[in-house]
Amino acid sequence: MYLNPNLNKRGKIFALGITLAVVLAVTFSLYLIITKPAGKIEREVMQPLAFLNVQSEAREARHYLEESADLAMQQTLSELLQDFPNIGNCEHFNGIVLYTACRPDVEKSKEVFENKFEGEFNLHLDSYKSSFLTLDKGISEEAYSGIISKQAKENFEYAFDGKALEAKSKERVTYLHSSLKYEIDFSFSSELDFSLDEVENLYTLGKNSFEKCKSESEILNCVDKELQGKSSFFNFSLEKNGSIVVYTFTTRKNYFHSNGFSPLEFKFALQ
C-alpha cells in the first residue's frame, strides 16, 4: 500500500512552502549569475543554493516519513483487530473467535503490533521518490530517494507501549554533497487514538453483559442496555444464533487500511 500524497492538506502546504523557497533561491541565483564575476558564483551562489536544496529535501523526506508512520499505525491496527492474539485455547464460530476458554492477550498484541508496523512502514519507505532536482552532478535523484528507502529504513529502534510508538534513529542520517554534509535525526513518534487495552475492555464488557443477561428471554435487549455508553471509541451491534451471541464493535472514526478508509471492526462471540 503506497502513500497517497493528496491525503493530507499539511503536505500540500509544506510542499508549496518548499517550492516557493526554491523558486526564490533560483531567482536570486540567476540575478547573481548575471551581476557577479564568474569566480564568485560557486562560493556565493551555488553552494548556498545546494545547501538549501539538500536541506529542503531532508525536510520533505521527514514529512513523508511522519505521514507514512501515521498511516502504517492505522493499517497495523486494522490487521491486529482482525486477528487479535489470545491467551488459552480458543474455539471459533463461523470464523469468529469464541471466547469460552480464552481471552485477549494484550501484552502479546503489543509485540505483534510492533512487528506488523515495521513491515507496513517499510513498504511506504520503499516507495519514496524524491521530488528535488540535485544540484550536484555526482548525486542522482535516485540517491536522494535512497536516503529514505535504504539508509533510514534500517536505522530505527522501535518501542510500543500499546498506544504510543517511539522510533529512535540509531544514528543521524547524512546527506552528502561535493561541498557540504547535512545530517538529520529522523527519530519520530506516533500514537493511536486508543490503547490496545481497550480491546480487553471490550471483551470484559461483553463477558459481563453476557453473564448478566444470558438467562433473560430478551437477551439482546438486555445486553444492549448493558453496553450503552460504555465505550468512548466503539459503537456496537449484536446478533444471536442459538445460544451464541456475536458482538461486533465498530470504531466511531474512519481509519486507513488495505481496503480503503472506513471504520474498523473487532468481533467475537460468547456462549
Image (cartoon, helix red, strand yellow):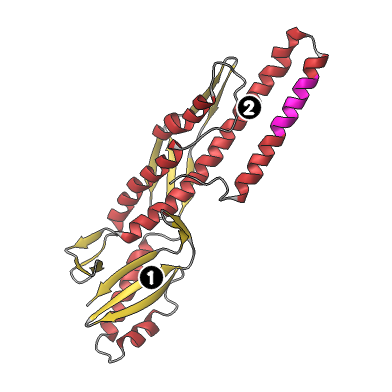
Q: Is residue 164 visible?
A: no
Above or below, comparing residue 130 to residue 197 in the picture: above
Q: Residue at x 47, y 53 (%)?
A: 191
Kindly identify the amino acid type of the residue bearing the numbered disc 1. Answer: Phe
Of the 4 image quadrants, the one containing the C terminus is bottom left
Which range is magenta?
Answer: 21-31
Q: Indicate the quadrant where residue 205 lies.
A: bottom left
Measuring from the top left, give residue 27's x and y in whole percent: 77, 26
Count of all numbered marks drawn on residues in the image? 2
Q: Nearer the viewer, residue 204 or 153?
A: 153
* Relative to 21, 119 lies left or right: left
Give the secondary structure at mark 2. helix
Q: Nearer the viewer, residue 260 or 122?
A: 260
Specify the label residue 53 is tagged with.
2
Above or below, comparing residue 154 to residue 199 in the picture: above
Q: CA distance from mark 1 to mark 2?
A: 48 Å
Kindly identify the amino acid type of the residue bearing the numbered disc 2. Answer: Asn
Residue 29 within the magenta-colored segment of the rendering: yes
* Relative to 253, 159 lies left or right: left
Specify the label residue 249 is tagged with.
1
Q: How busy is the neighbourhood of tag 2: few (under 14 within 10 Å), some, or many (20 plus)? A: many
Residue 223 within the magenta-colored segment of the rendering: no
